[in-house]
Amino acid sequence: MSQSPTPSMPSLATQSLGMSYGTRQVIDGLDITLPSGQVTAIVGPNGCGKSTLLAGLARLHKPDSGAVLLDGADIQRLPTRQLATQLALLPQEAVAPEGLTVTELIRFGRQPHQGWLRQWSAEDQRVVQHALAAAGLEQLADRPIDALSGGQRQRAWIAMTIAQQTPLLLLDEPTSALDLGHQIEVFELVKHLAHHGRTVVMVLHDLASACRYADHLIAMREGQIIAAGAPATVVTPDLVRTLYQVECTLLTDPDTGSPLLANVRRSPAPA
Amino acid sequence: MTVPRFATPNVRRATPRTLMLLLLTALVAVSLVSLLIGAGSVGPGRALALLSGAQDSEARFIVWELRAPRTLIGIVVGMALGVAGALLQAVARNPLAEPGLLGVSAGAAFAVALALVLGASAATLRISVAQLGALVGCVCVLSVARFRGVGNDPVRLVLAGAAFSGLLASLTSLILLYDQRAADEIRFWVIGSLAGRRLDDLLAVLPSMLVASVMVALIARPLAALALGERVASGLGHHPNLIRWLVIACVALLVGAATAIAGPIAFVGLVVPFVARAFAGPDIRRTLWFCLPIGPLIVLAADIISRVVVAPSELPLGVLTALCGAPVLIAVVRARRLPML
Amino acid sequence: MPFSPEDQFRADGNNNVPPPQGYWRFAWRSGNGANSLLFEQRAVVVNLGLFGALLLASVIYLSLGSVKVAPTAVLQALFGNADIMASFVVQELRLPRLAAAASTGAAFALAGILMQTLARNRLATPGIIGIDNGATAFAVASIVGLGVSIAPPAMALAGATTAAVLTFGLAAGNGTQGYRFIVAGIGVGAVFGAITQLMLARVAIDTANAAYPWTVGSLSARPSGALQLLMLGLVLGLATAMALARSLTLLRFKDATASGLGVNVKRRRLEVLLLSVALTGLAVAVAGPVGMVGLIGPEIARSLASSRSVPVLAATLAGALVMVLADLAGRTLLAPIEIPVGIVTAVVGGPWLLWILMRPQRSFT
């Protein structure tokens, strides 16, 4: 893992972004900037617009108003392929065609860099090997994806996005169907990627893991940002109450210094 | 408890009695039109004059010897196909289960073609052979449906049925291609039409229709219980497997008989219960009652149109039922929530 | 870590690397840098094998029939030094029909695998979702002459497009995945089938007999000119499909994944749909609705090829092979009666379709 730091770190931001789902306006006039080289977690209750925001950042949905800016340029104007060399996306519950092996899946990550007359370069070879190693999948390289455990499968998908060699990585609930051990596997891999110069943005519905693994937290409710910043500074009992209508006591993790939620209970009565 | 609403249009909740009365009136009216209108030279005016007592031997022959049996056959075929559709949908718990789509009619047609090639004569054996073919077709499709959960997905069952009936139709064409005599004998039957059928054909199938009616009357109640699920039905003291087999036998009798007279006609068994459920709600017993007037209404209306649109020749009935049935199929599939009956 | 292709390119000093397992790699340098091509070994073997089988089947096709011509005589006749009788039978009677069989089979199968990839469903072939029937209805309309006298291929194309618009339009909102889309297509197909019957019922028996092959799929009445158009379309279509092969492979993933890897999903899907519809229309104009080949060809190709990519070429070759064999069977099994090729493929394809349906859900990609 002797990767040199990224020469240029593109920045991703939104400018009065408005998006709707069908006829329903989900987010409106959103301005955010995603800190480079850090792990950003977007949290909020169900239906708060966090997945819609991620879809907008990845250009899966077209905004009604405003824009998503990559290095100051509207991503709607970028060719799909060029965007794919800047920004990788792991959708929720990604499914691979039957029978595909881990290496074969990872190789797909090289597609944005390949062409008709450049189907397999030395660089491709090197990057795929690196991605296998980074995700700790060398032993499983020739296994079919269907035969992996949930955590291994998710790591294989992340390895594909590593092979894409993009400075930006967007993950939609990467741990939603995983048990605790597998969740940790995935989060540690994500953390590792950020330390090696990637900007990671993930949507999470678990506030506790967001506190533990994110450098930057964006809390959303009803399409609005209600707090943004380092978890240790923005997560307060008030914030938790506003987000989820629950009361809690906040402790500090003695090992990592990140906030810990304790004694979570229902609010006595709605305000 | 909320009763699940099916993919059917909502009809204003008039009392069932009023609705039934309206439907019966409509049926009488359509039957009358069926006597009055035809492809030949006897127009509505002459036919009406005959009915009010005029002496007109040509008109008498055409109205009483040709159109009246045809109308009666239309009524019986409509009832049989409509009820069979409702029964099949209830037992497959699938709003798309339709004898024509699932290959039951194709099974009957194939059996008749096969019997002819093997040397049977069309007139004598057709009904029982058709019923046997329908039974085999029915059992085949429903066992596919119970196999590995194909039947749990209503839409997948239809696909299996379409594949099955397509296969049988091809085999039937193959047989007819191979045996010219059989082809000549049933050429006009295999298309599906009410034209040129005689009262004798109707009399021949009446016994099995009566048997089927008695069976339907007996199984309607347990079938309604089966709609709540197999376990509930057992808990209420019914025997789900026995009911299922009785229903299959019933469907085979009805579809076999209808196919023996009129040839394979698709989509009637889909459209009729679809409309009947709109009137009757989800209760299978009431739905079955409503199928009785609605089935003949639809078949007769289609038959009248088939005589008129391409006069002086006639259109196969199946073409018209497909034209009105396919949109219903699409509507059911498009419904946001595809119900399990 | 270099992020742009240019950076990575400069870093690439050595153009000699081992290919991924199971591939052959050819590399060379040119003015614009290091070039490389990858060929999947298994795909190469499968395609060569299918091509060989197609050649063999073609020779048998040319030799069997009411007049038997020995295989050696077939080859002589093809290269112009056989007796007049053999030359006439082979070159004038059987060769055009063989060409029609092979190109319609290839076109149906190519259209089939494109549509399946688009819908991510093995059952979504143009024949099953009603596009064949739409093309047939329009072609029959032009033949029985309901005041329309445009050539059958043009009408078949228009019909295929109409049916595709209807099916996709009616399924909109439910997406193109899953079985509802397919049943909507079955409904559309039933309507067009009924319309075809309606038109045939309206015309005199002679015209109806002329149009009959159209309803079952047959190679015995081939409209002049349609075959040349189909062959042209097939060559262009196959070239386009193979050029798109890399992004077709990505279309098998979810839209979000494909889009994340740099495929303009909407545009690509539209291109694939247009290609599939056009091929179907052109093939129907020659042979009528021989729907099952669009299912069988891709099935054979997938069972032979690996799951790494979409076997476009293998499916095309397999479709041609199936159609040639089916028409050979139709011509010879019940001779002198000729079984329309559509009936042969339906009898073979029906059980196959049922078998696919009864297999567990997971394998529906």
Image (tube, coloured by chain):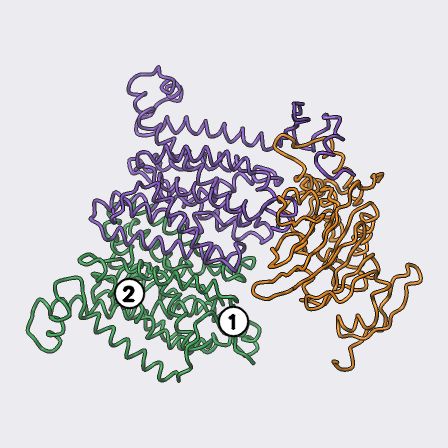
Chain colours: A orange, B green, C purple
Residue at which label 2 appears: B302
> What residue type is disc 2 on?
Ala
Vertically, is C237 above or below A42? above
Between A45 and A150, the one lying in front of the other is A45
- Which structural element holds mark 2? helix
At which x and y percent is residue A231?
A: 83, 62
Which of the two discs, 2 and 1, labels the residue nearer the N terminus? 1
Say which residue label 1 marks.
B240
> In the rendered image, which quarter is residue A39 located in?
bottom right
Chain ID for label 2?
B
Q: Amino acid at mark 1?
A: Pro
Q: Residue furthest right?
A: A254
Position in image of residue C329 (x %, y %): 38, 36
| Res C185 quadrant in image | bottom left
Q: Residue at x 75, y 67 (%)?
A: A226
Please provide percent x and percent y for residue A188: 82, 52
Position of A92 compared to A140: left or right? Answer: left
Q: Quadrant of the N terminus of chain C?
A: top right
Element assignment for label 1: helix
Q: Residue at x 34, y 55 (%)?
A: B111
